Amino acid sequence: MKKLIGSLVFALTSTAVADVINGAGATFPYPLYSKWAYFYMKETGVKLNYQSIGSGGGVRQIRNRTVDFGASDAPLKPSEAKKYNLAQFPTVIGGVVISYNLPFKDLKLSTKAICGIFLGKIKYWDDPEIKKYNPDKKLPRRKITVIRRSDGSGTTWIFTNYLSKACPEWKERVGYGKAVNWPTGIGAKGNEGVANYIRRVRGSIGYVEFAYALENKLKVTEIQNRDGNFVKPSIKTFQSAAKGAKWDPKKDFYEVLTWKRGKDAYPIAGATFILLAKDYPKERNSKVVKFFDWAYKKGDDIAIKLHYVPLPEEVKERVRAYWKANGWY
């Protein structure tokens, strides 16, 4: 039987079925959820079975009521959450990075260069728009191979949302979503697939969640932000992007963190979200909530080590009040 990539199963052979939490969705937080699940099982005996099948799959499975929770990096608008009778809350903040395979580090890409590359208009690495901000780099006359997601993806949603705000032509021609009609590129499944492809193909470029770039030892670009500064992905620049977030429980915490103003704001930041079915028995949702409450209390150090940004304590308290209002906490 073919092994499902990104399937996370931490099991104790004597654990009863009641002590299993089943979730599916975003690959963006998979490295973190896997660590949280490991330590949670050691402490409580409850195991988490999480399949990182992409945000589109996660939303579909919770809508079909086939999992205990869905996970998505593309937040549902309040109207969507209401339509499908879902609750939504954030877990951590992270960033989507642009990784590349060339024999040097510290490549800088302007907004114009990024738009041109992903629109398929900038085709070679020695293009003047790339050379302009990298005068010390020996850029080759090598064709650029764009790698992008082939599955319905919250990482794609965040990245194309950024492109739609930063590039008028992208907004007009392509737009944003979990899946779009790409003007160029080769598709790969999951953050894992994109990262593996970039690692293997010289001259390639693509977008992945930061933890996957680090895990695969991929080079990441400095990106020009809305204020015109070149910024590296980091805890600090992700926090800067999230600085003005309102996190309103009345709107099911719907928040988009791309293309924010700020000297140090990373332009492709985003939160990742959990979706619960409001019509499930309270005990079922309480089991999921207990896991994420444990993660809020004890998982911040793990998140930081993997280069995710924990939610501020004030936001965690708002989420707990939201859980309590639904009878799960």
Image: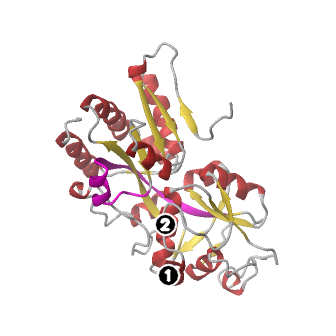
In the image, residue 195 sits, relative to residue 66, either above or below, namely: below
For residue 52, side relative to residue 238 (left or right): right
Q: Could you say which quadrant of the image residue 19 lies in?
A: top left
Q: Which residue is mark 1?
A: 172
Query: Badge 1, how many Cα within 10 Å: few under 14, some, many 20+?
Result: few
Q: Position of residue 131 (x, y in %)?
A: 71, 83
| 77 w.r.t. 304: above or below | below
> How many neighbours does mark 2 have within 10 angstroms: few (below 14), some (14-19), or many (20 or more)?
many
Q: Secondary structure at mark 2?
A: loop
Residue of label 2: 268
Residue range of the region highlighted in magenta in the rendering: 74-99
Residue nearest the observer in this picture, 280 or 116: 280
Q: CA distance from mark 2 to mark 1?
A: 19 Å
Does residue 57 appear left or right of residue 255 in this picture?
A: right
In the rendered view, tell whether residue 178 sits above or below residue 323. Answer: below
Residue at horizontal 31%, vertical 42%? 277
Q: Which quarter of the figure is the N terminus placed in?
A: top right
Q: Quadrant of the C terminus?
A: top left
